[in-house]
Image (cartoon, rainbow, N blue to C red):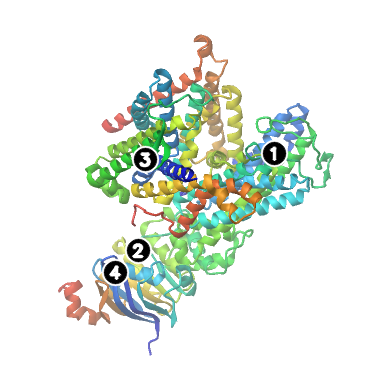
Amino acid sequence: MAETILAIERLTKRFGGLTATNDLSLAVEKGEVHAVIGPNGAGKTTLIAQLSGLLAPDSGRILFRGRNITALPAHARSALGLARSFQVTSIFLNFTAEDNVALAVQAHSGHSFRFLRAARAEAALREPARAALARVGLQHRANVVAADLSHGEQRQLEIAMAIATNPAVLLLDEPMAGMGAEESARMIEMLKGFKGSHTLLLIEHDMDAVFKLADRITVLVYGQAIATGAPDAIRANPEVRRAYLGDEA
Amino acid sequence: MAGANVTRIPELRRSLGDPRFVLLALGAVVLALFPYFGYVWGETYLVSLVAKMLIFAIAAVSLDLILGYGGMVSFGHAAYIGLGAYGVAVFSKFGIDNGYLQLAAAVAGSALVALFIGAISLRTSGVYFIMITLAFTQMLYYLGISLEPFGGDDGMNTRRSDFGIKLLGLNFTLNDNLFVCEKRLNPNCKVDDRDGAAIYYASYLALIAAVWFCRRIVASRFGMAIRGAMSNPVRMQAIGFPIYRYRLTAFVLAGAICGVGGFLFANHQQFLSPVYMNWLRSGEILIMVILGGMGTIYGAVIGAIGLLTLEEVLEGYVGKDYWQMVLGPLLVLLVLFANRGIYSLIPHRMRGVPMFIVRIGVVIFGFGVFVWLMSKSSPIMKLAGNIPHLPLYVIFASLVLALALRYWQESRARHG
Amino acid sequence: MGQLYFETLLNGVQFGVFLFLISAGLTLVFGIMSMVNLAHGSLFMMGAYAGSYVFQQTGSFALAVVVAIPFSLVLGIVLEYLALRTLYARDHLDQVLATFGLILFFNQLVLRVFGATSQEFRLPDAINFPMPLLGFTYPSYRLIVIAVGLLVALGLFLMIARTRLGMLIRAGASNRPMVGALGINIQMLFTLIFGIGAALAGLAGVMIGPIESVESGMGESKLILAFVVIVIGGIGSIRGAFIASILVGLVEVIGRVFMKDILRTFLPEEFAQTAGPALASMSIYILMAAVLFFRPQGLFPARTG
């Protein structure tokens, strides 16, 4: 029996006259890779912002593991196990790759009111950081300053920071944005490796990646989910074809 | 927000292979021995001056903590020097000289006010933050002026703090007649040797402690949280840091450390004045941090010593009337061309040292020539007779030259 | 007593209008060019000095005003060209420090050239007499200042709402890169805006000069008030600057005059005597803190996103 780990109930968000999220309901099952696709302006990033806590919905609820997190601020959701990566790379440019991930680990290991002990010497921070870097394949670049990493490596670092704390659910906002074919292929392999151990809610435009990775797909148009189901069903769905995929898919 | 440029100064290595370490260690030793030589050569004024530099270095170091590592551009940091001084004055007024009480009051008072100011200011960011910290410090300044019991605008004399310690023949218990202070700030000065050393060493030790403490902080978890918040506040929130509380804590710490500086300053000057708190002084401390190199802690020390030395030299040679006129444009140039600070210019490997010495020599030589030209004994003066306002014309001539240079630069860029 | 209330109220409005003249330029420069210009107070001071110099040479107040305004305009443009243009791309910290250096420079400049005593600058009796108004009397010159200020405010509103330049200003305040991308000569727009701001500051300086003292450092206290005004009003908003300046002007003047009396109603006399002036001088900062507590972006922020 599939367990719902993240439930979105009748979520609504308006910006003035524009309804970005329109009475949206969605249930993400534990352990699955659930992709959200849709044309530009469908409200995908707004959805992620509301899920991660950076934006407050006008109405509706978000339930994480059965608990209502709608009013929780971003840092609290992160502490509960809901991590996110950003569409536009948002890392700490003047820190090394390992420092970046160690910060993510630090956020989850108690308070940071420690003033005298050197953070770089704390194994409790460095070990998980190195492990996360290894999982995304960046271990050999651990001591490179983030600003010096290639775009693809920075995207990988994004993911490393998100998984460093072993979150239950990963919200990934276009992880393959701006990547070339080779880098995308590597990213897809890496994300495949997360199946089972994490639940992924993935926003992506790269249809190739979506159909390779997703267990289920939800199609978002004008803030509403017009279809949810297995990839083949979605591909065949006539409404979806009309709205988004076009008839050649 | 400040700190957007990615500064990549290599970490200080505690070995003789790192010129910066050598320089800092040398500097620490020289400063430790300075009073002895100062008194031997009869330069008691110099000892007092260097003590003042050390005190402001403490203030600058505390500002670097929040500015260089936290990205909080506080234009109100001088307030804590004032508050620390008031910590002394409050007790001094009633004849209580107990140093421990005064120091406790200075630190607690500064920390509390920093808590209040920080709690409100840190809800904003960017230029709003700068302006609010500026406004708060002005508010305290006006408050100080209107406090008649403490002398209001004129300030009041304070007595030296008494810690009840006698060490190495240096008298750490003091009475009214023995002090070294600066005539510019306190017109009631009388000069005596020995107790200047007490203040000097107290300041020196406090500075060493402040530098040590701040360096530890920036490498700690707390420091990482602050630095992350400066680098990318949105991401910090997203990964789970409630950054407001960490920033506020850093702000309070910086205020408290600066309060110690204020306590020492009141002792140094034997005087309290609200002018310690005004925004021009805040600006000076800001300049010290930038001049030395922000985000390094050591840079703040270099900057404080550097700026105060610069001011002394200018005042001495260019005359007390013009030195700020030279300082002003120098500041503008500093910001435009050298805003990574002095610390970043010091080579981090031994092989860079000869070139560095050459560059320093050139700069000092050029500066010396400029100051000499502007001074009263300059050949321009002799050539042109006794033209009043001569340095003014020199400055204007350089401004016109700068204008012409800009114009030429721009037209080259257009047709280049 | 009525006379006191009447005078205080009008003084508050006059001070507010005067603050508006200084803040308008500041908020435009910050809103459009995203530049913090601490030297704005120096432009105000130079306007006052230019006016007083002309007055000392010619004895004519009118001539002083006529010269001071274009002088400030030109000074502003030269300053922008020479020193400030390179600062647009820099972060705010750099701008603060560089313009701080300019303050030091200008303060010392006037000190050297004109000396430390405040400058002689007087109003002709023809425009400075107690004028009967609504049953009370009020100095006619201050009424003129209020009138000029309101006219300028009106002029600015019309310019911003009706002219092409105004449209560019509004566009630039809410989305600067777009305006550049639209092919408008951004540099000329900036220089023009800066010049307007400088001219307004100079106008404020020459008008206020006769009723306050013209001396080195006179700009700084006004500058801080101006920043408080634009922070309260919302950076980049002329409307915000106007409302905030009147508000600040009233609070400041009424506070100074009546704070002791207000405190007297519920505090013992000695407290009222000492706390009165202290609280009065802090009143606008308390106002600012209060506004920012509820609206950290100010009352009418120009940037909506």
Residue occupying image coordinates x 29% and y 63% = A181
- What residue would you read off at disc 3? C25
Q: Amino acid at mark 2?
A: Gln
Q: Chain of mark 2?
A: A
Which of labels 3 and 2 is toward the front? 3
Q: Is residue C41 above or below residue C279?
A: above
Same chain, marks 2 and 4? Answer: yes
Which of labels 2 and 4 is toward the front? 4
Q: Look at the numbered disc 4 and give the secondary structure of its residue.
A: loop
Which of labels 4 and 3 is toward the front? 3
Q: Look at the numbered disc 3 and give the secondary structure of its residue.
A: helix
Q: Residues within 10 Å of mark 1 (few under 14, many from 20)?
A: some
Q: Is residue B204 visible?
A: yes
Q: Amino acid at mark 3?
A: Gly
Q: Which residue occupies the extreme bottom position in the image?
A: A1
Q: Is residue C212 above or below residue B221?
A: above
Q: Chain of mark 3?
A: C
Q: Amino acid at mark 4?
A: Gly
CA distance separating discs 1 and 3: 40 Å
- What residue would you read off at disc 2? A87
Q: Which mark is residue A43?
A: 4
Q: Look at the numbered disc 1 and give the secondary structure of its residue.
A: strand
Same chain, marks 2 and 1? Answer: no
Q: Chain of mark 4?
A: A
In the picture, measured across the screen, residue B96 lies left or right of residue A109, that is right
Q: Residues within 10 Å of mark 4 (few under 14, many from 20)?
A: many
Q: Residues within 10 Å of mark 3 (few under 14, many from 20)?
A: many
Q: Position of residue A33 (x, y in %)?
A: 35, 77
